[in-house]
Image (cartoon, rainbow, N blue to C red):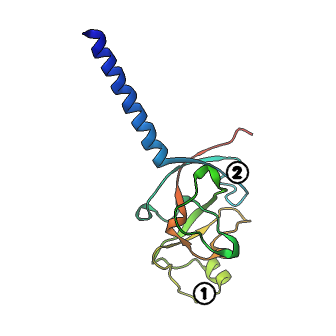
Amino acid sequence: MRSRLHGRLLLLVVLLAASALLVARRLLVVVRVRGTSMVPTLQPGDRVLLRRAPAGRLRRGQIVVLEPIGLGRQWGTGPLPDPAAADWLVKRIAAMPGDPVPEEVVDQQGLPAGTVVPPGRLVVLGDGVHSSDSRAWGYVPFDRVLGVMLRALVSMS
């Protein structure tokens, strides 16, 4: 009787652990930083732990990981690629829908002064001096954001 109870308890613990792992894999992602656009905040080779975040949970100032912009400066459509199968972009949200577009983006994009970010779009900037970001591409659609950085996992190299 006692060994049967222990067996059921062990099975329950294993099932709970497996369920927790599946949930964590759907909510959390690790991505490697490539390039210098986020220096000094993040270095090339650093890894970042992300929480997948719906558009409603994005906030100005957060570091986000985005799908790279495609050829012809067009954003993709449909589901995002597998996190392990793409070279993701790491940027900081500079403006949300309804916020004024930052001056450096207005200047580079040739927008009228006082332009605000349209619904469903973000303005992102790199922290580094050399960054391809909204100054070059314009607005980023919410659905191209893979997640929000929770923590930097600094590289050992």
Identify the residue at image location x=48%, y=54%: 52
Left or right placement of residue 134 versus residue 157 in this view: left
* Residue 129 found in image quarter: bottom right
Residue at the image point whose x is 58% and y is 57% from the top: 81
Outermost residue to the bottom: 112
Q: What element carries label 2?
A: loop
x 61%, y 82%: residue: 106
What crowding class fits label 2: few (fewer than 14 Cα within 10 Å), some (14-19), or many (20 or more)?
A: some
Q: Earlier in the sequence, mark 1 or mark 2?
A: 2
Question: In this figure, which residue is indicated by the disc labeled 1?
Answer: 111
Residue kind at label 1, given as amino acid type: Leu
- Screen quadrant of the N terminus: top left
Left or right side of 50 for 8: left
Residues at badges 1 and 2 in contact (C-beta under 8 Å)? no
Examine the image and state in which quarter residue 68 appears: bottom right
Relative to 106, say whether 84 is above or below.
above
| Amino acid residing under circle 2 | Gln
Q: Where is residue 120 in the image (x, y as percent from the top left)?
A: 47, 73
Which corner quadrant holds the C terminus?
Answer: top right
Q: Separation of disc 1 and disc 2 at Cα? A: 32 Å
Label annotation for residue 50? none
Label 1 element class: loop
Q: In the image, residue 8 lies at what x, y percent?
A: 31, 20
Tally the marks. 2
Name the spot of residue 36 as percent of width and height, x first.
73, 58
- Residue located beneath label 2 in the image: 43
Camera-side residue of 38 and 75: 75
- Identify whether 84 is placed above or below 120: above
Horizontal side of residue 88 vs 94, given as left or right: right
